[in-house]
Amino acid sequence: MKIDLVVGARPNFMKAAPVVEELRGDPEYFRVRLIHTGQHYDVRMSQVFFQDLSMPEPDIYLGVGSGTHGVQTAKVMIEYEKVLLGDKPDLVLVVGDVNSTLACSLVAVKLGVRVGHIEAGVRSFDWEMPEEINRLVTDTLSEFLFTPTVDADQNLLKEGHSPDQIHRVGNVMIDSLLKHREKAEKSPILTKMGLEPQGYVLVTLHRPANVDAQEQLKKFMAAFAEIQERIPIVFPVHPRTQKMIRTALGDPSDRSGPDNLQKGSPLTEGTINRLRNLKMTDPVGYLDFIKLQANARLVLTDSGGIQAETTVLNVPCLTLRKNTEWPITLERGTNTLVGAEPEGIVGGVQKILSQEFPPGREKAGVPELWDGKTAKRIVGILKNLALQGQLFTNSIHRGNF
């Protein structure tokens, strides 16, 4: 059975790595072609993750690079169509919710190739998020829907998908986390950064609504300015976002003014240089980042994947959004939505630091099937489908069209 497994951006790599390993461990049944679209092409956003996850080199690299959503999606479609016209697999497996996921699914279905979506059914119900549109369309196009949670199953059933299409397998990202956690603990990142376990807050921001708008960046930095007076902040940030932050705050060479900020005061030129306890760094590798997460007092993020990882690591997470595609993390009490306003962010941090939060923490525990065996379940299902002959036909049955 010939399978194309598509990756394109940093969130895909830790989801795809266990599946590649499992498929290639059964060469009697599977021939796997790893397709890297090149949506994330920077070494710090791509190559280092392949190394840390021990992923094989891609069989095909499309090299599409950056661009607007439309341009990037179109480039992936054009380049991947060339691949499929030259050699069609029996199945295309896509993961997550990035532009590459949508683009390759659409190309495959139009050429009569079945699609399986890993992490299907995940919903934020926020149509302002490009990822939500990618999820919905990809699930509509996919024949085989591999879900991480019960609520994902329920979302798909409400949308009219057939129960026969839905396979609850768990969260494949957690496979990578559990496999590499011990190795990550050996990372020297804390020593290099001068950090103590439980002695810092870890921050990540990447969503366009948060990092592309100067006014919103100013709000975040105002919150961080207040928080860093109580506890150091570590903020791995892409160089592009670093530049946007410095542009939003003024001339980075201006070091005039007081050494600390008045609480609630607006950020002015040179502010970033006076935040002595805010450590802005370049992006770090997967193992270093897991070490930073596992040892943080709490995490501030707008990432869906980090909400899931902190739940397994049992680290308090404050999500800088008004919604989440991982409601199970709220149920477990490890994650809380605090929005994007400074008052909510600072208030949430203060509650955790004073050990008054989160109130539902007694429910904390690893969700069902988040046990490191998700990739095994996916490959087991594919093997059964192959043995039944369901993956060796050119006709595509879509029960919800």
Image (cartoon, rainbow, N blue to C red):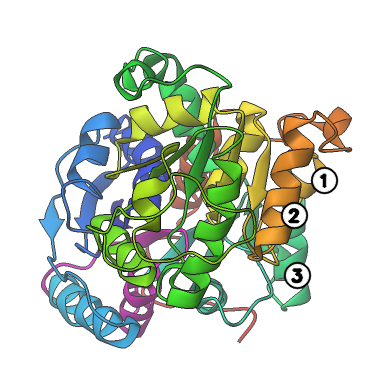
* Horizontal and vertical percent position of residue 237: 34, 51
- Choose mark 3 or mark 1, whichever is in front: 1
Asked which secondary structure carries label 3, the reply is helix
Q: Is residue 76 left or right of residue 128?
A: left
Q: Nearer the viewer, residue 290 or 283?
A: 283
* Horizontal and vertical percent position of residue 112: 34, 79
Q: Is residue 143 visible?
A: no
Mark carried by residue 327: 2
- Choose mark 3 or mark 2, whichever is in front: 2
Q: Is residue 279 left or right of residue 283?
A: right
Instruction: Look at mark 1 in the image and give the residue it sits on.
Output: 331
Residue 73 position by quadrant: bottom left
Instruction: Look at mark 3 in the image and give the residue it sits on.
Output: 157
Q: Residue at x 28, y 35 (%)?
A: 24
Name the N-terminal-most of marks 3 and 2: 3
Query: The C terminus lies in which quarter of the figure?
Result: bottom right
- Check disc 3: other Cα within 10 Å, few if <14, some if 14-19, many if 20+: some
Q: Label 3 vs label 2: CA separation?
A: 17 Å
Q: Amino acid at mark 2?
A: Pro
From what the image shows, is residue 290 above or below residue 272? above
Q: Residue at x 23, y 48 (%)?
A: 46
Q: Amino acid at mark 1?
A: Glu
